[in-house]
Amino acid sequence: MKKASLLLSASLLFIFSSCVSVQVKDNNLSSTSSSKKPKNIILLIGDGMGLSQVSSSLFFNDQPSNFERFSTIGLIKTASSSDVITDSAAGATAFASGIKTYNGAIGVNNDTIPVPTLLEEVSKKGLSTGLIATSSIVHATPASFYAHVKLRRQYEDIAAFMPTSEVDFFAGGGQKFFNNRKDGRDLYSELESNGFQVYTDKLPTTISEKKEAILLAEDGMPKKIDGRGDFLPNAAQLALEKLAKSEEGFFLMIEGSQIDWGGHSNEADYLIGELIDFDKTIGVALDYAKINEETLVIVTADHETGGFTLASDDGDYNKLNPTFSTGGHSSTMVPVFAKGPGAEFFNGIYENTEIYTKMKQLLLE
């Protein structure tokens, strides 16, 4: 009886191991060359967005949440090379360049040596590229896709990368880093000399034949609850109209930057307003991908901020009281949502650097 039990256990272990082996193999892009690959990728990053933040879009949104339109969902580990709890710079560099680096690094490795970004790599293959953020465009997340500096707060140095970058469309704040600089450089003129149409008053209603540089605030954009309006979804729509003209395809990164800021300040209304705005922008991306079926939409976060929890209100399980446990980041894993060709490779649990690896394999290999 004991021998039979051992044989049964061994058989079950073999079957389980085989299943695990097959799952890992099936999640390896190189082993599934017959899988359909995307022509375009839209990467949406909810800065500071953990599962409780995502859940708030279900409970506080007067519209159905676009998160529910995804069937492929994974989790990523977010630690940087220097800290268990990452910052946005190291987190975004993991997405943009596929490496673990130290907190504060923008597009450089642990030895402060510049590393190529996915945006730069796909541009060399003829794809169009775009960046959108509700922060300044020189803030950590967007910066990590086009700049290479030792420390994230070198804002003027970061801005100086943009005129000669491979970016075809960008929108966000950050005017003072382009036209009111300590070194006296006028980056507006440099942008125009390098083929950009510069907008500083409002989003244009139509796209031009030139590259688009849209800077609508001195630093970060206004809060959603303070009247920012539909800047993020409208900028996403405008970018898609622009980048879709590329016959080779495109890569577009969209950041809901201020979800993080609401978490840092422990202001639930601020955070939830930004999250719902981001949710609406996800809808724009998914609607585009529904019509343009060669488009992969990925939604994730660099880390969670605030230790945000949807707790009960004084023990009332029918009433939510959003609370926080920290004014900083946390180490919790964060979700990954994917829809479109190649989406199946984003399930499971993996390192944040794999977001870059999977996107690169799907677009370039």
Image (cartoon, rainbow, N blue to C red):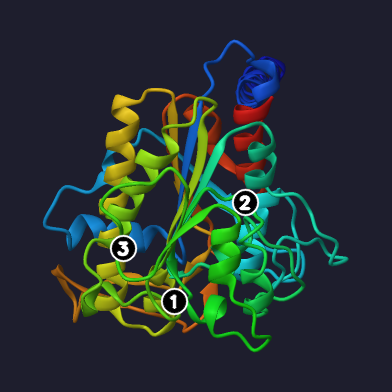
Res 62 quadrant in image:
bottom left
Q: Amino acid at mark 2?
A: Phe
Query: Which residue bears the numbered disc 3?
Result: 275
Distance between the alpha carbons at the discs numbered 1 and 3: 14 Å
Rendered position, 287 above or below 44: above
Query: Which residue bears the numbered disc 2?
Result: 95
Which residue is nearer to you in this view: 347 or 112? Answer: 112
Q: Amino acid at mark 3?
A: Leu
Residue 163 visible at all: yes
Name the image quarter holding the N terminus: top right
Q: Please count the marks in the image.
A: 3
Distance between the alpha carbons at the discs numbered 1 and 2: 22 Å
Q: Amino acid at mark 1?
A: Gly
Rendered position, 209 above or below 38: below
Position of 240 compared to 345: left or right? left
Q: Which structural element holds mark 2?
A: helix
Residue 351 on image: x %, y %? 65, 49
Res 357 quadrant in image:
top right
Q: Which structural element holds mark 3?
A: helix
What is the crowding at mark 1: few (fewer than 14 residues within 10 Å), some, or many (at least 20)?
many
Q: Could you tell me which residue is drawn at 65 percent across and 44 percent down?
A: 118
> Which mark sits nearer the N-terminus, 3 or 2?
2
Res 153 quadrant in image:
bottom right
Which residue is nearer to you in this view: 225 or 201? Answer: 201
Residue 332 on image: x %, y %? 53, 63
Position of 126 compared to 265: left or right? right
What is the crowding at mark 2: few (fewer than 14 residues within 10 Å), some, or many (at least 20)?
many
Residue 139 visible at all: no
Residue 49 on image: x %, y %? 42, 62
Query: Which residue bears the numbered disc 1?
Result: 306
Q: Which structural element holds mark 1?
A: loop
Question: Contact, CB < 8 Å: mark 1 with mark 2?
Answer: no
